[in-house]
Image (cartoon, grey):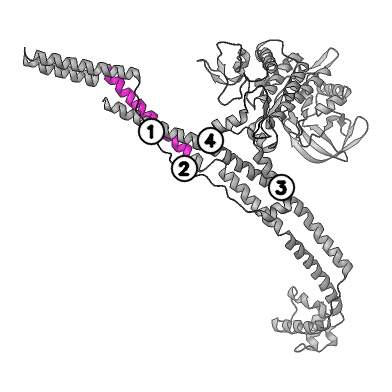
Amino acid sequence: MAWFGNDGTSYIPSRQLGRGGEGTVYDLQSHTGLVAKIYNEPPSQQLQHKLQRMVAIRSIHLDRYAAWPSHILQDFDGNMVGFVMRNLSGYVPLHHVFSPMDRKKMFPDKGYNFLVHVARNLATAFFRLHEAGLVVGDVNEGNILVSANGMVAFIDCDSFQVQDGNTYFYCEVGVPRYTPPELLRRKSFEKVVRTTNTDCFSMAVLLFQLLFLGRHPFAGRNTSSADMDEETAIRLGHFAYSLTTEKRKLTPPPDSLSFADMPPEVKALFHQAFETAERPTPQQWIPVLDNMLGQIATCSLSALHTYPASFPECPWCAFRKQKGIIYFLDDSYIQANAALGNLEHFISTFQAQPLQGNKWVQPALPRLKGHVAVSVRTGLRWRYTVSLVLLLVAFAGSFIHWSCLYGGIAASIIVFRFSPWAKKLRREKNKLRAAGRDAFARLHQMITEYETPNDLTAGNAALANLTQFIASYRNLPAELEHRYNALEEVLYNEQLDDYLRQFYIEDHTIPSISTARKRTLIENGIRNASHIPRLATRKVPGIGPAYEQKLYDWRRQMSAGFVYIPDNYRLRQAREKALEEVTPIRHQLAQKIRTEYQSYNFFRLNISNRSEALRRNAEQQFIKCHQAMADAREIDKWM
């Protein structure tokens, strides 16, 4: 199978890299750095015209910031089937960068400054695309890729809105959470002319997600009674982090990075992007992000903890200490992985240390005094007061008539047991007991997580793999020697066979082997001493185990005069061959060791960093539990 470019170049596919609903992407032989996208269905005339226009406006900037079509591909009959584009090998989807969990695994050595750097490059990419007269349209975190050095590139470029004179090739798809409100209010995107201003909204959402670790600007805590998903919030303009709206219906979700502490110019651009109709352009974002990157502060405790200098303290240390949340790894990760610099030393000194949870130790309990709400105490006083007054009235009335005493006592009991104050007391008691049960359930959950951390199983699985790979690596010298000895044994047996070929069965007297048996052996291909081992796989009539043993004994007698003369040239070749076989195994094991050690180290540090916060939170919860018990006992005194 082959395809042909519009310049006559032939393109031969090698392997399939991916397949989607629209087409399949293939690696290409003899075209390093290029891939082919082949449509599953024949492209329409409109799509063909669009692709031809895209190839015509190709530029160095488009190639740099996008997997841009470079050549149209045709089949043998001249039908358009797809196009050639740059291979973005080593790039990953953008959401792997702003998602803390993915980023810590894929970019463990990157700090917040890397996110700002990627944000700046993303704004530059939009600038270059807009400069070429293009509108991305369907902007989302899945069609933008980023490399390890922070370079950004768009994919699925054939969905862009492209203009050719007065003709528009529309982008008729979109993801709601990245779509501006004026387009969300439409029923469909069919034949909608998008603008760079609509792109600027989508770009601002992505920039926000990069700078706020994946948080969406229109997702937060709903303070209203109406349902408020992201699409509704965008349509209504409810920016969750707004500092200009007094009565907000959305507020930032818990454990978010402080928007108020961001540089003033960054806050201003986000307010403009999400609260006005004219959004800031990429040209406006680039210098602001450059300035933000130039004013990044570094934590005194960790070189990986970088943050905007406008913040009063390192937010990553604060999140870890106060909430046990690890948004960025610290220097201990770098120090631990520095051991892999000298891999041989690391392997020779490695000792497996299984990850273990901590044993919960109950803290000393301070003296706790039960508390009852003021409103409840007031009700209790009225309850006792009215009951007491009724008893006194009953006692005084008994001097008039004895029935007054019983009536007063009954009324006092009714007030004491069934009055609104009594009901409120019981409700408060039940509420305190329910809160106590919830507090103890939460404490149990905290202790369980402290003693058996979530990452424990995965961490020990990585350690088991690491231990296995290191054992295999340590065994490589023995494996090399084994392979060399096996090859040398082959050379030895070759010389021995050459030597034994001179001893023909018919020329020698072999105990118990008659002339007839010799004739049978020769007829079955066993003519000399070197052929005797063939008896192991060849059944010869009249030659049973006893006769086989006689033949092997004769062969051993013939080989007594054999002298092995090492062939140094072939031995050197044998050693080189053994080394050639073992070397790729060594490289593979080395890479696996590095990967598994990084995984193990990642889980180990996660457990270590989170355990202190878990212990502190559990101790605080322990006190809350006993405070709830003290409050319940206090209210029991009033029952």
Local SS, label 1: helix
Local SS, label 3: helix
Query: Label 4: which residue?
Result: 613
Q: Which mark is residue 341?
A: none
Viewer-closest of 512 and 106? 106
Identify the mark nearer the N-term, 3 or 2.
3
Tag 4: amino acid: Ala
Identify the mark nearer the N-term, 3 or 4.
3
Tag 1: amino acid: His
User: Is residue 68 visible to the viewer in this orientation of the structure?
Assistant: no
Find the magenta span and give its range.
421-447
Query: Label 3: which residue?
Result: 340
User: Is residue 323 visible to the viewer in this orientation of the structure?
Assistant: yes
Can you say which quadrant of the picture contains the N terminus?
Answer: top right
Circles 3 and 4: CB atoms closer than 8 Å: no
Query: Label 1: which residue?
Result: 626
Circles 4 and 2: CB atoms closer than 8 Å: no
Q: CA distance from mark 1 to mark 2?
A: 17 Å
- Which image quadrant is residue 195 in? top right
Local SS, label 4: helix
Is 625 displayed left or right of 355 in the figure?
left
Query: Label 2: which residue?
Result: 360
Circles 1 and 2: CB atoms closer than 8 Å: no
